[in-house]
Each structure stands twice: as structure tokens, then as C-alpha cells.
């Protein structure tokens, strides 16, 4: 299968708990404005094994998919959340957010993920989509994380 992978590291000038709050289930719609609903359907919120039905709107198109929390670590100086979902029956997406506390006012953020085409049409689109476009989207998302954290 054809996949695009990325890893973006940055320093966020805020406390780890402030940044971690951005990634909590209750705040997903703020971080990802296209998400209209993020409803728990299995497990406990903000925990490994949690499954949410997510409804996204992109222009006139509305889609629904199930987001599974694969990994969830919440320690005082280290936090990690990894999620996975299939989008439009065409792409398998995995996202991981890792936070390391450097001091009271600085947090190291690693945002990484994989966007894997799972059907023929998606594979063709993937080949046409330049990595530069994906890189630009990743950078914009990291900027959005900064804004939501107030940094």
C-alpha cells in the first residue's frame, strides 16, 4: 500500500498540561474545525481503547468514521496520544502526538502520522498528491496546535 509518513518536531512555549488539554476528546472540535461531532461509542474518554464516532464536514460533503485511541499515556512530564481511523473508505490514517515537558513553560511536541491509501482510486490520488502539499498541511496543523494552546 502507498503511504505518506511525516514527523514534525517543535518547541511549544507553554506548560505541558496546557498543551495536553488541546488533545483531549472534549476539545477535538476546537483543534479540528471540520469535526462536527466526536461521540464516544465504546470505552472511556481519553483512554486507550476508546472509540468515537466522528462526523466531519468538508464543504458540502459530510462523512462519518470511527476513531480509535490506540495509545494514551498521561504522566506528569510525558504524554502521548495515538489515534487511527479510516477516512472515506479510501485512506487509513494514524496520528500520534507526543509531549515531553522541558520545564514549566516549554514543551517539546512531536506530531507524526501516516496517511495510507487503501483502494485503487486513493492510490492514484496519492501518487498525484505531492509530498510538499502534505508537508504544508502538517505545518499548518502544528501552527493550529500552537494557537489552540495559546502559544
Image: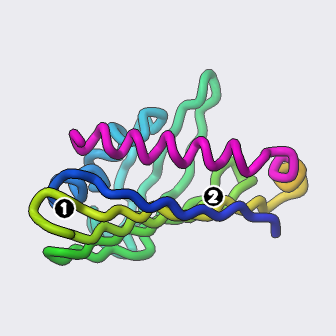
The verdict on residue 16 being magenta is: no
Residue 10 sits in quarter: bottom left
Q: Residue drawn 69% across and 48% down?
A: 88
How many numbered marks are there? 2
Residue at mark 1:
16
Whether residue 25 appears in this view of the structure is no
Residue at mark 2:
86
* Contact between labelled residues 1 and 2, with CB atoms less than 8 Å apart: no
- Using residue 82 as the reference point, say whether residue 147 is left or right of it: left
Task: Give the label, 2 or 1, closer to the camera.
Answer: 1
The verdict on residue 147 being magenta is: yes
The x, y position of residue 143, in whole percent, is 41, 41
The x, y position of residue 148, in whole percent, is 28, 40
- Above or below, 46 relative to 36: below
Q: Which residues are magenta?
A: 125-151
- Using residue 21 as the reference point, say whether residue 25 is left or right of it: right
Whether residue 54 appears in this view of the structure is yes
Element assignment for label 1: helix
Spatial CA span between label 2 and label 1: 29 Å
Q: Tell me the colour scheme of the image.
A: rainbow
Relative to the observer, which residue lies in front, 38 or 129? 129
Dominant SS in magenta: helix
Q: Residue drawn 56% across and 51% down?
A: 65
Q: Residue drawn 9% across and 62% down?
A: 104
User: Badge 1 local density, few (<14 within 10 Å), some, or many (20+)?
Assistant: many
The x, y position of residue 100, in whole percent, is 27, 71
Amino acid at each position: 500500500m502507498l503511504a505518506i509518513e511525516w514527523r514534525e518536531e517543535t518547541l511549544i512555549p507553554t506548560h505541558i498540561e496546557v498543551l495536553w488539554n488541546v488533545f483531549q476528546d472534549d476539545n477535538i472540535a476546537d483543534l479540528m474545525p471540520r469535526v462536527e461531532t466526536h461521540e464516544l461509542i465504546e470505552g472511556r474518554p481519553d483512554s486507550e481503547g476508546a472509540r468515537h464516532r466522528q462526523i466531519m464536514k468538508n464543504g458540502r460533503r459530510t462523512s462519518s468514521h470511527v476513531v480509535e485511541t490506540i495509545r494514551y499515556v498521561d504522566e506528569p512530564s510525558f504524554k502521548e496520544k495515538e489515534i487511527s481511523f479510516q477516512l472515506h473508505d479510501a485512506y487509513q490514517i494514524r496520528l500520534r502526538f507526543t509531549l515531553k515537558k522541558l520545564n514549566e513553560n516549554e514543551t517539546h511536541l512531536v506530531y507524526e502520522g501516516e496517511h495510507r491509501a487503501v483502494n485503487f482510486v486513493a492510490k492514484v490520488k496519492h501518487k498525484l498528491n505531492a509530498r510538499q502539499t502534505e508537508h504544508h498541511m502538517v505545518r499548518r496543523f502544528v501552527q493550529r496546535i500552537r494557537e489552540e494552546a495559546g502559544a
